[in-house]
Amino acid sequence: MTSETRVIAGRNPVLEALRAGRPVERLFIAKGASGGAIDEIIALARERGLSVQFDDRRRLDRLAEGHVHQGVVAVAAPVPYVPVDEMLARAEARGEAPLLLALDEVQDPHNLGSLLRSADGAGAHGIIIPKRRSAGLTMTVARTSVGAVEHVPVAQVPNLAQALAELKERGLWVAGADMAGSQDYWDADLRGPLVIVIGGEDKGLGRRVRETCDFLVRIPMRGRINSLNAAVAGALLLFESLRQRRGRSPSMDRVTFSGGNWLSRQD
């Protein structure tokens, strides 16, 4: 499977695509555009044997379809969606307990882009989204992620609740963010093999997904608004998991991996 992202607009998104080795078909730079990022983009393109076309900004405006391009547009191969197994293999290769983020019908592409950026910053091994009623990897997502879309694997699954159940069978714990949670998120143990689940903008976690979670955690609110948006909630839980894992020895963070399963659910 591949995503929808073919046109990449903006200096950081194009730069990260080149750094990640994503196949680029064409690269357009506005005449007169300059700066450190532009110079690095040109240098990387020439290292890879890519031709750089210097063109009128109006041409770039048309290619970017209304998105802010900062004088740089690339036409590239779509970012591929990956199997969930690839994320687990990534964690094993790093000698780390898996940290995944699952999104239950998060439909705002800006939220998905922000969550990709947070997942990259927190060292998560991937994001899982459902095929239906969910934002995909569009140009808006790529730009909002500031290039993180090139570094954080994303899996699309037909049924999110079923995918979570399968991960539980393989030894991962599933923690859902929900105002009805029994404990504040900083009191929950977020250190082991873990999937953090964030609900959609309108209704939060769906019933089946909520029932699949091992436990629910809440984000305490002191003001008059009773919830945060998906991007902020996801970032808080990801970085709390990172905080809890930080400073622990690799032998403590490394759980037993055998036959494709993470053997740690005895805690």
Image (cartoon, helix red, strand yellow):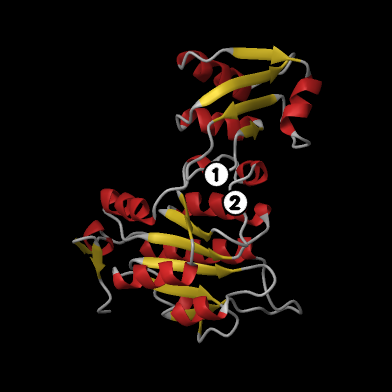
197 w.r.t. 67: above or below: below
- Residue 36 vs residue 157, the one in the foreground: 157
Label 2 packing within 10 angstroms: few (<14), some (14-19), many (20+) = many
Which residue type carries mark 1? Ser
Tag 1 near tag 2, CB within 8 Å: yes
Split into 4 quadrants, where in the image is the C terminus? bottom left
- Name the image quarter holding residue 231: bottom right
- Name the image quarter holding residue 98: bottom left
- Residue 114 vs residue 247, the one in the foreground: 114
65 w.r.t. 240: above or below: above
Helix, strand or loop status at disc 1: loop
The span from disc 1 to disc 2 (Cα, nearest Å) is 7 Å
x%, y% of residue 66? 78, 36
x%, y% of residue 56? 78, 16
Helix, strand or loop status at disc 2: loop
Tell which circle, 1 or 2, labels the residue nearer the N-terminal end: 1
- Residue picked out by circle 1: 3
Q: Which residue is drawn at 51% across and 13% down?
A: 46
Q: Which mark is residue 138?
A: none
- Residue picked out by circle 2: 136
Q: Is residue 5 left or right of residue 121?
A: right
Which residue type carries mark 2? Gly
